[in-house]
Image (spheres, rainbow, N blue to C red):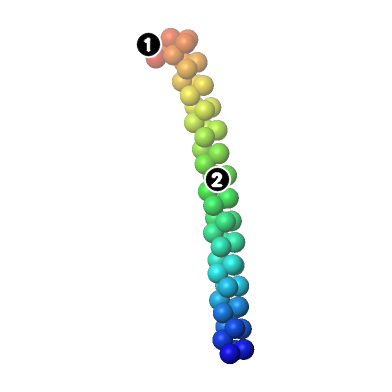
């Protein structure tokens, strides 16, 4: 019975490590999304400026 409890504890620790790795992946994807959002906003500002100045009309 003790060995079974130790095995379950090992499984729980493995799942915890996997959850932490997934959390790290999610944070990385969130940072990438924020960076892409910033680029999109910057590009939109440039497009709006060009339209305002009449360069694309």
Q: Residue at x 59, y 61 (%)?
A: 20
- The numbered dot on residue 30 is 2
Q: Is residue 57 left or right of residue 4?
A: left
Pinpoint residue 54: horizontal percent, then vertical percent.
43, 9
Disc number lying in front (1 or 2): 2
Query: Mark 2 packing: few (<14 Cα in 10 Å), some, or many (20+)?
Result: few
Pinpoint residue 18: horizontal percent, then vertical percent.
55, 66
Q: Could you tell me if the residues under marks 1 and 2 are in contact, i.e. CB atoms within 8 Å? A: no
User: Tag 2 or tag 1, which sits nearer the N-term?
Assistant: 2
Q: Residue at x 47, y 10 (%)?
A: 53
Q: CA distance from mark 1 to mark 2?
A: 36 Å
> Residue 12, relative to residue 44: is it above or below?
below
Residue under numbered circle 1:
57
Residue 51 or residue 11, whichever sits in front: 11
Q: Does dot 1 land on a helix, a strand or a loop? A: loop
Q: Residue at x 58, y 50 (%)?
A: 27
- The numbered dot on residue 5 is none
Query: Mark 1 packing: few (<14 Cα in 10 Å), some, or many (20+)?
Result: few
């Amino acid at each position: 019975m003790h060995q079974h409890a130790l095995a379950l504890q090992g499984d729980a620790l493995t799942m915890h490590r996997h959850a932490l790795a997934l959390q790290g992946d999610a944070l990385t994807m969130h940072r990438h999304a924020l960076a892409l959002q910033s680029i999109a906003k910057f590009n939109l500002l440039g497009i709006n400026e060009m339209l305002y100045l009449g360069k694309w009309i």
